[in-house]
Structures are given as C-alpha cells and as structure tokens.
C-alpha cells in the first residue's frame, strides 16, 4: 500500500513536470517504485493507477506521440491541475486570515494555504477552538471520493459502511452514510474507531443524488449514533415549545403545561448531539431526567468555563 501511494505521487509529479506526453515505457523507466517488467502486468497496473488518479480528480490527458497516432502518451497540464488565482483583494485576504487563525487545525496547512493565496493581511484572531485531525480521516475522505465501502472495528464490533461524507460536528469528526449491516443511515465518531478503516474497491456504491452528509447530523442529531440508548425528558419553555414539537413531533410530548411549556421525551443514542441540542435552546430548556445526562451537561459546561479562565 505504501509503495503504491509513493508511486501515485511520483506518477502525478512526473506527468506534471513533462513538456510532452510520455509513453508508458518512458514512465516505467522514470518511476519509483517501478512498474513490473512484464508488459501485460505493467499495462494493467498503470491503468489501475490512472483510474485511481482520475477518480481523485487528477486530470490526466491522453495524446498521440507521433503524427500517425500509433502510440499514445500521457501528461497533466498544470493549468488544469493547479487552482487558479482567485484574485482576492486585501479585505478578503484579511477575512481569511481571521478565519484560519480563529480555528486551529492540527498542523499549519491553513496558514500555508493563505500564503499561497497572496499572504496574510491584517491581524489574525485569537484561537477559540482547536480541532484534532483523526488518523482515520484521510482514508475515509479517500473512500468518499472513490465511492468505496469501508469496513472497520467500532467499539469491538465489525461494521460495513457506504460513506457519503465526513462531517465535523460538536467538536468531533463523524463519517456518515448507509450502514450495510443495519440497512439504515448511521454516523460514526472517528475517535471511537478501534483501528484504521479498510477500503474496498472504487465504485462499489452510488450515493443518493440529493444526499447532504451534514444533514444526517442536523435533522435528527439524537438518532444517528452508537451510544447505549437512554431515554431523556426535557422541559422546554413556551417560547421554544412550538419549534421543538415541530422538530420532534407530537408523539414526543409527554406533558403540556398551562404556561405553554412542554415536556418532551427523546431516545438518545448520541450524547454529544443531545448536549449540543440542549445548548442550542439556551435557558429555554432544562433536562429533567435522567440525572446522568443532566450531570454530564453541567460537568461539560464547567470544564468549558474553567478552560476559558486558564
């Protein structure tokens, strides 16, 4: 796997650097790790590599190398591959500078990208959030791009997923898609993977044409999770009651009070999502039960306040 990744990177660099199309034999002479000596095996392996790069969006061009067109060569035109200059003005670069310094990702890729777009303008922001990049993130992004199924161990259980996208939500990375074992949509937190995911072959599934991965965690943030199910009761005051009932449905209401407030019952299988849902309601919601969910929210808020003081 490592050899193939190195060869794909070298193949991309070689096709970008050439001023004329290169035949497969010429590529075989230049690339490391090398292609097989057997011509049939070499052609087969090259075609797999070419298809993989194209699925990743690399624009490989096929052109004749002689006037008769008896043999073809390959190249990547830099203007097709590299991002064009977006022509940002000073105010737009300053806004980007604030954005990339306000949320700190692992590494410094955002600042390097800002430099390539014309450099820093104005003052950056004090970081108010730091986002870790999970080890499972790169292969899952590749699986989404290639439309490859992924298999992985999640809390000690083998799962198989058709990944539609990777989403950052409530401070955690999630992969969302169709769980083949449950035959239902699911979201999985990347930091709960027991080991790196294993990718299947490209083109193993076709996602719905109108799918929005982020919608999995917006529409019903309490359902798409893998925590042990727990029933929660939440008191919502009159100013937010209508919105909550519209979101959860009338079946969720267990009590309607004279002042317009409602008590709703929810089956929670994603505690992070539940916490975010309650916080969105601010002072208009109170967790009545169970005590463990109430205590969990209090502890989380206390830690957040303490962290802001230090």
Image (cartoon, rainbow, N blue to C red):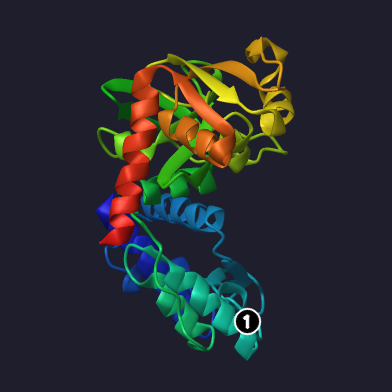
Q: Which residue is drawn at 55% across and 76% down?
A: 96
> Can the viewer see residue 27?
no
Give the percent coordinates (x, y) of residue 229.
42, 15
Give the percent coordinates (x, y) of residue 174.
45, 40
Give the percent coordinates (x, y) of residue 238.
70, 28
Residue nearest the observer in this picture, 189 or 74: 189
Q: Which residue is drawn at 49% across and 38% down?
A: 276
Q: In which quarter of the image is residue 65?
A: bottom right
Q: Mark 1 — residue? A: 92
Residue nearest the observer in this picture, 73 or 271: 271
Indicate left or right for 265 with 251 as reference. left
Q: Residues within 10 Å of mark 1 (few under 14, many from 20)?
A: few
Give the percent coordinates (x, y) of residue 165.
53, 43
Q: In which quarter of the image is residue 117?
A: bottom right
Q: Residue at x 39, y 34 (%)?
A: 297
- Is residue 241 placed above or below 282 in the rendered structure? above
- Is residue 142 placed above or below 75 in the rendered structure? above
Q: Residue lying at the far front in this picture: please name it.
A: 259
Indicate left or right for 192 with 188 as reference. left
């Amino acid at each position: 796997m490592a050899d193939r990744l190195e060869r794909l990177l070298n193949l991309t660099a070689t096709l970008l650097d050439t001023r004329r199309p290169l035949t497969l034999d010429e590529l075989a002479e230049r690339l490391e790790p090398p292609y097989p000596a057997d011509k049939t095996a070499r052609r087969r392996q090259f075609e797999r590599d070419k298809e993989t790069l194209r699925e990743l969006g690399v624009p490989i061009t096929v052109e004749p190398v002689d006037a008769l067109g008896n043999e073809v060569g390959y190249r990547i035109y830099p203007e097709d591959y590299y991002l064009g200059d977006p022509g940002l003005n000073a105010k737009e670069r300053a806004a980007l500078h604030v954005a990339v310094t306000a949320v700190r990702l692992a590494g410094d890729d955002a600042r390097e990208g800002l430099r390539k777009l014309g450099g820093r303008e104005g003052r950056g922001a004090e970081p108010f959030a730091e986002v870790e990049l999970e080890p499972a993130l790169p292969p899952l992004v590749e699986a989404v791009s290639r439309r490859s199924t992924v298999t992985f161990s999640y809390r000690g259980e083998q799962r198989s997923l058709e990944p539609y996208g990777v989403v950052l939500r409530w401070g955690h990375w999630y992969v969302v898609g169709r769980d083949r074992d449950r035959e239902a949509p699911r979201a999985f937190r990347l930091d709960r993977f027991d080991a790196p995911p294993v990718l299947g072959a490209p083109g193993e599934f076709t996602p719905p044409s109108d799918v929005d991965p982020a919608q999995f965690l917006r529409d019903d943030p309490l359902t798409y999770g893998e925590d042990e199910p727990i029933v929660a009761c939440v008191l919502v005051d009159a100013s937010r009651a209508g919105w909550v009932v519209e979101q959860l449905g009338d079946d969720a209401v267990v009590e309607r009070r004279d002042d317009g407030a409602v008590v709703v019952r929810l089956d929670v299988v994603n505690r992070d999502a539940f916490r975010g849902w309650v916080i969105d309601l601010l002072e208009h919601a109170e967790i009545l039960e169970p005590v463990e969910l109430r205590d969990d929210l209090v502890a989380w808020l206390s830690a957040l306040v303490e962290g802001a003081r230090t």
